[in-house]
Image (cartoon, rainbow, N blue to C red):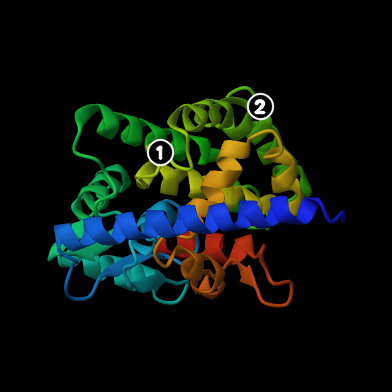
Amino acid sequence: ESEGCRPKMLSKVLIAAGVAMTAAVIVAKRLKRAKKPTGLIRVTYWAGRGRCEPLRCILAAAGLEFENVFLTVQTGKKELEKLRSAQALAYDQVPLVEIDGLNLVQSAATSNYLGTRLGLLPSAAADSYLVQHVFAASQDARSPLLSFPFSDFPDAPSPEALDRVRRECHGTKGLFGRYAMKWEAMLQASGGPFFLGSAPSIADIGVFEVLDYFRDVFGKEETAQALASFPGLRRLLVATKALGRLADHCDVERTRYATWDPAKQQHCAWLGYATAVRATLS
């Protein structure tokens, strides 16, 4: 590495640190104005990403502590029936987020509630629309990843299943073939690092989560290659992970998921998660 490159690299690091600090201050101020939720926040779902992970990431990015209640092979069916009997699930489905004395279900409605409640969804109509459509697109983009653990159930996902998901993500209607290009253009227009410039929102968290999910499935090297032509998205990933306690959630708390393989130090035990889901719902 040349001596001339070091000042430039240091400058980039300092800029990234400054952006992250500014964003963290914005989130903290918004949460203070909104009044931080009191009491226990509980999230009920299986020990994997599924439809719940974007919601967990929103809570973590806002700096909130929450209890994960995992539905397991042994306890899932009983716990789900208990919630249904208590009428805690409006449509008998999880994820369930218990906050502010409410039982929040339906992922889209829950993400909007959390965004509004935690200062991560703007009040201006045009800005709110932008944030909501980007978040909705991130949920569409993660569909192939969402179904991947179940690809060859009751067996673990095969290499062929992995290739199918890869093709879908890079296809004309997939994560990188469609969505990443659109998001990159929006980030360039906003000046970044977020879709609303310096103000983070659930849009950034949704996009962060799906790209981070891709990394869990395909690894750091392949993800870096896929993002090589998307500097705005790379910057968003760094800035978003610095929000609240999101880094701790990603790097520490997720090691408790059924998908985590401690020997390999990565998420690749997809069958354990899929088995828990099927056992609960069977």
Q: Is residue 277 visible?
A: yes
Residue 267 badge: none
Question: Residue 59: horizontal and vertical position, in percent?
Answer: 33, 61
Q: Give me the residue at 35% from left, 45% from top.
A: 199
Spatial CA span between label 1 and label 2: 29 Å
Q: Which of 206 and 166 lies nearest the eye of the viewer?
A: 206
Whether label 1 touches label 2, CB < 8 Å: no
- Name the residue rendered at 49%, 73% in the picture: 253
Left or right, 44 with reference to 90:
right
Task: Tell me: residue 40, above or below residue 247.
Answer: below
Between circles 1 and 2, the one closer to the viewer is 1
Q: Residue furthest left?
A: 101
Q: Residues within 10 Å of mark 2 (few under 14, many from 20)?
A: few
User: Which residue, given by chain and number where applicable, does mark 1 sit on?
Assistant: 197
Hey, what amino acid is under mark 1? Gly
Q: Position of residue 93 (x, y in %)?
A: 30, 54
Q: Amino acid at mark 2?
A: Gly
Under circle 2, the secondary element is loop
First-in-chain label (1 vs 2): 2
Secondary structure type for disc 1: loop
Percent position of residue 89, x then y: 21, 57
Dot 1, crowdedness within 10 Å: few (<14), some or many (≥20)? Answer: some
Query: Which quadrant of the figure has residue 99?
Result: bottom left
Q: What's the residue at 81%, 51% (across, down)? A: 4
Residue placed under numbered mark 2 in the picture = 171
